[in-house]
Image (spheres, rainbow, N blue to C red):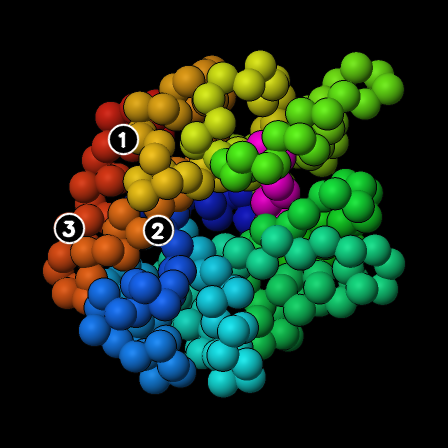
Amino acid sequence: MESFGARLHRAMVERGPLCVGIDPHPGLLARWGLTDDVAGLDRFARTVVDALGDRVAVVKPQSAFFERFGARGVAILESTIRQLRDAGSLVLLDAKRGDIGSTVQAYASAYLDPSSPLYADAVTASPYLGVGSLAPMFELAHEHGGGVFVLALTSNPEGAAVQHARTPDGRTVAQTVIDEISQLNAGAEPLGSFGLVVGATVGDTGHDLSKVGGPLLAPGLGAQGATAADLRTVFGSSLSSVLPSYSREVLGAGPDVAALRAAADRVLADCRAVLPAR
């Protein structure tokens, strides 16, 4: 099966370097005139799929905002993933899972096994039980052409206390994560399948991303305060691997489909002005 990295590279060339989240916050549902219930969630998700599924390279449903409605919400998530894939978008499920042993194996099977109803092209994962604890995710992703995006330098202010802490060899915790993911991507062309999450709001942290070889997901753009121009500061010479991610900046234009498309086109143009041509 073709690797996730190769499929992502092609999607970014054909559709542009953009990821849009599906984050149905209660406030956003209200802004769209929708009820904060399963019916509102379903209408919201279907509208985003209709507007962007055939236009955006990657769409990133935030699992928590579906899970909060229980089994019916998860059923809508399953349907949303299927609809997005049918429309041609790659689906990055934002679940941020991390565990050990049989539990992380179960998470891997849930999100990265094609037989699962929650099967996505890629998933986000937390490495703070050790990057090695995520091996079942990496292995299943490799087997089925999937991807894993591992948290490295996140945009929340609390993250720095852990991520910038020093290990016995002098590297930060974040740099050890970066280096281990770099090893997984060694030799992959045109892009590795194992990515990192690096917030667009973190500024120049002094971390070395030059050898990652995989995609660099950059959330925090738009409503969280970062602009496309900030990508230069955060990523420097690694800009060619960046996948900018927007959520409320685009979703706030809804529920009108044409307005959602226009918002996505606008932020994509902003990113293209900064990122190297593919």
In this rendering, is residue 239 above or below 194?
above
Element marked by disc 1: helix
Q: Amino acid at mark 2?
A: Ser
Task: Say which quadrant the C terminus sits in.
Answer: top left
Contact (Cβ within 8 Å) of mark 1 with mark 2: no
| Crowding near the residue tagged with mark 2, few <14, some 14–19, many ≥20 C-alpha atoms within 10 Å | many
Q: Which residue is mark 1?
A: 272
Q: Which residue is mark 3?
A: 262
Mark 3 vs mark 2: which is more N-terminal? 2
The answer to whether residue 118 is left or right of residue 236 is right
Q: Amino acid at mark 3?
A: Ala
Report the span colored magenta. Answer: 146-153
Q: Which mark is residue 247?
A: 2
The answer to whether residue 252 of the structure is visible from this angle is yes
| Crowding near the residue tagged with mark 3, few <14, some 14–19, many ≥20 C-alpha atoms within 10 Å | some
Q: Amino acid at mark 1?
A: Arg
Mark 1 vs mark 3: which is more N-terminal? 3
Please state the horizontal and vertical placement of residue 185, each as a whole percent of the image: 66, 34
**Which residue is painted at 31% across and 23% down in the image?**
229
Instruction: Kindly report the distance in space between the C-alpha atoms of the residues bearing marks 1 and 3.
Output: 15 Å
